[in-house]
Amino acid sequence: MKRGTIGASIIITIPVMLMGCSVYMLPGEIVGLVLNHRSVEQYLHPDEPGRLPVLVSTHLVYSVPLEKYGHPVRFLSDEELIGKPHLRFTSVWAEDDGATYGAEFEYESEGMVGSMTAERQADGSWILTKIETAENNTR
């Protein structure tokens, strides 16, 4: 299995096989970049009851220790998140042997949908090369 490193973390750059289909998992470090981007932060509302700690679905995501608004980010299964505000990645893709990741995501309780692309730098860190969010008017 081919592996790349990011700091002390190891990420798998080969898709996971799930029921005969290839499924890419988004590195947790990229999740942190998404959570810290101003276009996503505007939907998190940490001052509202039930919004802290920030919750992220483990669907298509490798969890790593992250902190947001002075609290550890909690990674939970979809079943544990029913009825709770949370960020969920709905699709993930990878290119260039895992050097580029893209994803679509949602923060359903706010009607927000988004997409992003991230690239791994020579030092192993990640940068967002594109991120877009919009309000989904069908909620």
Image (cartoon, rainbow, N blue to C red):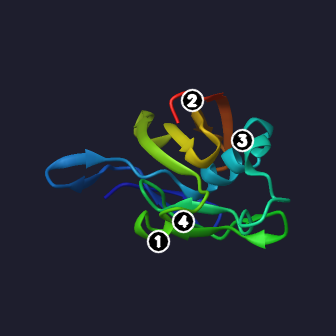
> Is residue 123 left or right of 137 when viewed as pictured?
right
Q: CA distance from mark 1 to mark 3?
A: 22 Å
The mark nearer the N terminus, 4 or 1, is 4
> Is residue 65 left or right of 36 when viewed as pictured?
left
Q: CA distance from mark 1 to mark 2?
A: 23 Å
Q: Residue 17: name its quadrant.
A: bottom left
Task: Verify CB contact (< 8 Å) between mark 4 and mark 1.
Answer: no
Q: Position of residue 15 (x, y in %)?
A: 31, 49
Q: CA distance from mark 4 to mark 1?
A: 15 Å
Instruction: Give the secondary structure at mark 2.
Output: loop
Q: Residue 115: name its quadrant.
A: top right
In depth, the one of 26 and 44 nearer the eye is 44
**Label 4 neighbourhood size at 10 Å, few (<14), some (14-19), many (20+)?**
many
1 or 3: mark nearer the eye: 1
> Is residue 34 left or right of 57 when viewed as pictured?
right
The mark nearer the N terminus, 1 or 3, is 3
Can residue 48 be seen by looking at this rendering?
Answer: yes
2 or 4: mark nearer the eye: 2
Q: Which mark is residue 66?
A: none
Q: Residue at x 63, y 55 (%)?
A: 29
In depth, the one of 71 and 93 nearer the eye is 71
Amino acid type, residue under disc 1 in the picture: Glu
Q: Residue at x 44, y 67 (%)?
A: 77
Amino acid type, residue under disc 2 in the picture: Asn
Q: Position of residue 74 (x, y in %)?
A: 62, 70
Instruction: Give the secondary structure at mark 4.
Output: loop
List the residue tagged with mark 2.
136
Amino acid type, residue under disc 4 in the picture: Ser
List the residue tagged with mark 1.
80
Q: Which mark is residue 63?
A: 4
